[in-house]
Image: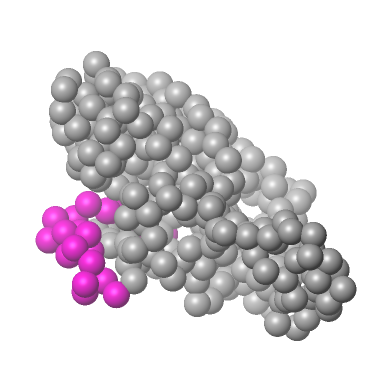
Amino acid sequence: MTASGTQLDALTAAGLRWHESGQASLTGPVLRLATELDRAFAILGDLWQAEPEQHPATIPAARMHELGYLRSFPHQVSFAVALDGSPANLDGFRAGPMVTADGVTGARLAPIQEILTPAACYHIYGAHRGERLDGPRYLTTRNTCFRREDHYRPLRRQWSFTMREIVCLGSESNATAFADRARVVVSEFAEHLGLPIGWEPATDPFFRPETDPRYLLQKIQPLKIEGRYGDLAIASVNRHFEHFGELMDIEVGGTPAHSACLAFGTERWLYALLDTHGTDAQEWPDLTQAALDVRSRMLGW
């Protein structure tokens, strides 16, 4: 399915509203499908008794610098900005054109302190800074995430999109076992939904990757594996070793915690479902039941 012509019309009829900024509004049947998808992801998280967390839409720029994100992905960062609050600056803004074809103009910005969330799991590592764990801890969170791209396509590649993540903090063996199980869980869930997916090693989209040691490490030892529907990654399983444990001073058993995460891109799952089953809601699979079936089958793992 491509999001053009009559197919985009069909998506619009099902409840998609596409914005040229690279963002989508969901209403009607497509919104209900997205809501059920996230409910299904949360049910899969029950396999680890993952504790839910809710975090803001922004994250401190200082923390993301500390985690190395700003250096590795400056091309994808979206900043949360505000006008400098001085009366003279605000008066100048009000007196000016405010918005032109080039965007907002005519005023000075306040110092940038926050960025829009690029991946849901980043909040978790900072939220658990300094913790001393007796054993593995599993957490889950959902957020609207933002990444700048050189082009956008409805449901496939967006500036803002929804991400559900399940995170393991624990020992190396805990993180390895989580990553292995997560891959099987996603495969089982996709099979229940009639979605053919394959797994491929991948690397993150680093800026100037040839100069970034994290990219080189991912090439030498695959740390990121993507579940792909055709050429589209709809899920990923990521190993971080002690990277976040060391930076955020999280320990388990007296040593830096290892971490791993399972990430679901909601809009991309929507694309795969609509591409496979069409835009008629009567033809869509029961996502909640599929997740419950997988959870029941996998409990003995």
Q: Is residue 86 left or right of residue 94?
A: left
The quarter holding residue 134 reads: top left
Q: Residue at x 33, y 49 (%)?
A: 67
Indicate the position of residue 276 as horizontal and vertical percent values.
53, 58
- Which color scheme is applied? one colour
Which portion, as a residue range, is magenta?
Answer: 208-230
Q: Is residue 122 magenta?
A: no
Instruction: Identify which residue, 235 or 4, lies in the foreground.
Output: 235
Indicate the position of residue 172 as horizontal and vertical percent values.
16, 33
The quarter holding residue 17 reads: bottom right
Residue 151 showing in the rendered view: yes
Query: In what quadrant of the picture does the N terminus appear?
Result: bottom right
Q: Is residue 72 above or below residue 26?
A: below
Tell which residue pokes out farthest to the bottom in this image: 101
Q: Residue at x 67, y 69 (%)?
A: 108
Indicate the position of residue 25 as horizontal and vertical percent values.
71, 57
Q: Residue at x 83, y 66 (%)?
A: 91
Instruction: Identify which residue, 69 or 15, lies in the foreground.
Output: 69
Indicate the position of residue 35 as horizontal and vertical percent values.
64, 40
Q: Is residue 287 left or right of residue 106?
A: left
